[in-house]
Amino acid sequence: MSTAGVSRPQPEIGHRFNEVRQRTLALCEPLTPEDMMVQSCPEASPAKWHLAHTTWFFESFVLGEFLPGYRLFHEDFPWLFNSYYESFSAFPEKRLRSSFSRPGLEEVLRYRAHVDAAMERLFEREPEPEALRRIELGVNHEEQHQELLLTDILNAFFTNPLRPKYREQGSGVRDQKTGSGEQRIALKFLEFEGGLKEAGHAGEGFCYDNELPRHRVWLEPYKLADRLVTCGEFAEFMADGGYRRAELWLSAGWDAVKANGWRAPLYWTEKDGAWSVFTLRGEQPLERLKAAPVSQISFYEADAYARWAGHRLPTEFEWEAAVEGQTVEGNLLDSGRLMTASTELIQNENGAKHWYGDCWVWTSSAYLGYPGFQPLAGALGEYNGKFMSGQMVLRGGSCATPARHIRVSYRNFFAPETRWQFSGIRLAS
């Protein structure tokens, strides 16, 4: 969270709080109560848990401290829905979240209503600046969980033998119409000057503590691809033995390939020699998505592809310097597509396609604190800082990221073997 004070006036924070809370419920509308119990991989959480945990955040870090006389909804919820805040309370193992048949969905929804009503009372009291700062953090925290909810449901539906659709195609989603892939848009590289650049959050708006402090970095002249690597291009890597050639892989990556039997991105399935890709809109033939960015790949796969293509992955600072000053626009959650879009659908005014959206871009940067980094005080200091080991940085947001949530200095991070997120490739040279 930014140390620069409250970034928005109270009415705006209150409006955004209501808007975000409603959007979370809207994202759950296509789901059955049974869908909301599924935890299909160790990284994922059930949708019902997301509903409860995002509510727990406001109860635990806002209402309990800033609303006099606030009454807990349930005495067990403060520890039951704690995710990983060791200094706040004990908490159940993450892998057990799918076993929480109780509380039931209706009780979780009553919990949300109870907390929302209390938050309304707090807003009426004109909360102090520290309370507003925490509310703004909580709103951004819930937006993170909106994306996680969608990625977790995608994985849950992929593991379901019926392969159900989260949503139908709908009138707001344009047909990719890529045919056999012959209409490929040539990959071009944009040149950027090196030199001494500033990185990290600037200005008065909200940011997380891991985006601070703003500091200087030295960059040599570099080039970035004007778009993301497509499914068609990644299929060529596969056809050239990409998953069988040890020389293309980092040692830990090659170990992951062998241990997990990787031979394609996570949601690609081969049947009778033809590949399909599972999306939130259901199963799609690869032929139809050849011009769409490849997604759900690990850092190791991104790095191996870049080496095969004769290029490399960008550093997080190269990406940030290139995108500084660009408008946040692209195929984000607000587009309603819920899947990657063909490269010709969105183009920035400077000729670069998809600076934001479609897929988070794996960078070659390890997730570490900036020079002078200081985590927030208390339990909230566990939000980011304690994960600064063994993770890689991703930039730019995805088709499941709310547009108001992303910014040029935003740092996402995952372990290098992670594949269930909307993560893809932008080449550097």
Image (tube, rainbow, N blue to C red):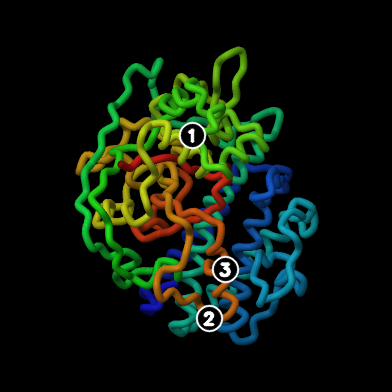
Rendering coords of residue 157 (x, y %): 65, 36
Q: Nearer the viewer, mark 3 or mark 2?
A: 3
Q: Is residue 93 above or below residue 171?
A: below
Estimate the spatial distance between the alpha carbons at disc 1 and disc 3, rounded to whole Å.
32 Å
Q: Up-down: is 298 above or below 165?
A: below
Q: Quadrant of residue 86?
A: bottom right
Q: Secondary structure at mark 1?
A: helix
Q: Are marks 1 and 3 in contact (CB under 8 Å)?
A: no
Residue named by callout 2:
377
Residue 187: image location, x then y, percent: 29, 31
Instruction: Report helix, strand or loop for mark 3.
Output: helix
Residue to which mark 3 is pinned: 386
Of marks 1 and 3, the one in the foreground: 1
Q: Is residue 114 at all visible to an observer of this figure?
A: no
Q: Which residue is mark 1?
A: 248
Q: Earlier in the sequence, mark 1 or mark 3?
A: 1
Give, as a three-letter code, the residue at label 1. Answer: Leu
Amino acid on which the number 3 mark rests in the picture: Lys
Front residue of 237/360: it is 237
Q: Nearer the viewer, mark 1 or mark 2?
A: 1
- Measured Cα–Cα span from mark 3 to mark 2: 13 Å
In percent of the image, x 53 and y 79: which residue is there?
122
